[in-house]
Image (cartoon, rainbow, N blue to C red):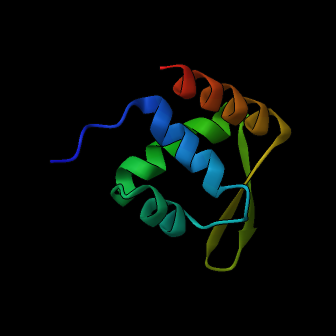
Amino acid sequence: MRRRRSRYEIIYLILEKCLEKSTITQISYYIHSNFNQTRKYVEELHRNGYINYEAYKDGKIYYITEKGIALKDKIKNLLSDI
């Protein structure tokens, strides 16, 4: 049985995936979560300036910002201490 992941683990994985430009579907597969749940996290991270996106004809491609890189590093340190 898989253990339940914390909110921070999920955010970390999203930020990690956004180091390379990724669609919401690619992020969803990477973090092993459903599309709607992934979209909620991605929208929150975008609203707070941790990721940004480029619009293209079929949707959006997300990428991490400098602020997001700093948060990813903080979460990594936090998770390694637990």
Q: Pinpoint residue 55: horizontal percent, then vertical percent.
A: 73, 66
Q: Residue at x 80, y 43 (%)?
A: 65
Q: Give the image location of residue 45, x and y in percent.
A: 61, 38
Q: Is residue 17 left or right of residue 7?
A: right
Q: Position of residue 26 (x, y in %)?
A: 52, 68
Q: Is the residue 55 above or below the residue 19 in the image?
A: below
Find the residue positioned furthest to the right.
66
Whether residue 36 is situated above or below residue 68 in the rendered picture: below
In depth, the one of 15 and 2 nearer the eye is 2
Q: Residue furthest bottom?
A: 57
Residue under the image location 72 percent in, 65 percent down: 21
Tell which of 56 and 41 is nearer to you. 41
User: Does residue 52 appear left or right of residue 79 in this picture?
Assistant: right
- Extreme-front residue of the structure: 81
Residue 35, quarter of picture: bottom left
The one of 58 and 63 positioned closer to us in this rendering: 63
Q: Position of residue 14 (x, y in %)?
A: 56, 49
Q: How many marks?
A: 0
Q: Is residue 20 left or right of residue 37?
A: right
Residue 64 position (above or below residue 58): above
Q: Residue at x 61, y 71 (%)?
A: 59
Classify residue 73 as left or right of residue 40.
right
- What residue is shown at x 24% (from left), y 39% (from top)? 3
Can you tell which quarter of the image residue 32 is in? bottom left
